[in-house]
Image (cartoon, grey):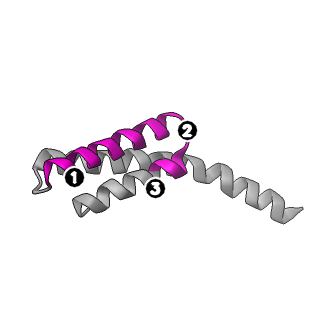
Amino acid sequence: MKQLTLAAAITLLAAPLLAGQCLADIAAIDAALAAGTELSEADLATVQELRDEGQSLHDAGDHDASVQTLAEAKAMLGI
């Protein structure tokens, strides 16, 4: 029973951390795009689509999927 309670507490505490990670990732992507990049137009469009999808997932409360999606965009940008 203690383990179940501990697992539940960790899960509840982790959700806000992931939500904050989403926003930090979005800000990092936005900053990298504003600074300029040598990506092709097609790759820039993909990065923007991934960023927008990550924002939508974050807004919907699916922070795990948001972090994963934003990680793809960050990888394309080299950040």
Lower sequence index among marks 2 and 1: 1
Kindly identify the amino acid type of the residue bearing the numbered disc 3: Gln
Q: Alpha-carbon neighbours of circle 3 within 10 Å: few (<14), some, or many (≥20)?
A: some
Lower sequence index among marks 1 and 3: 1
Q: Quadrant of residue 23?
A: top left
Could you tell me residue 16's position as x and y percent? 55, 46
Q: Is residue 45 visible?
A: yes
Which residue is at 36% across, 49% downward?
A: 24
Q: Up-down: is 72 above or below 24? A: below
Kindly identify the amino acid type of the residue bearing the numbered disc 2: Gly
Q: To which residue does mark 2 refer? A: 61
> Which element is circle 1 on?
helix
Q: Alpha-carbon neighbours of circle 1 within 10 Å: few (<14), some, or many (≥20)?
A: some
> Which element is circle 3 on?
helix
Q: To which residue does mark 1 refer? A: 43
Q: Nearest to the eye among marks 1 and 3: give it.
A: 1
Which residue is at 67% across, 54% downward?
A: 11
> Which element is circle 2 on?
loop
Q: CA distance from mark 1 to mark 3?
A: 18 Å
Q: Is residue 19 left or right of residue 55?
A: right
Q: Nearer the viewer, residue 47 or 10?
A: 47
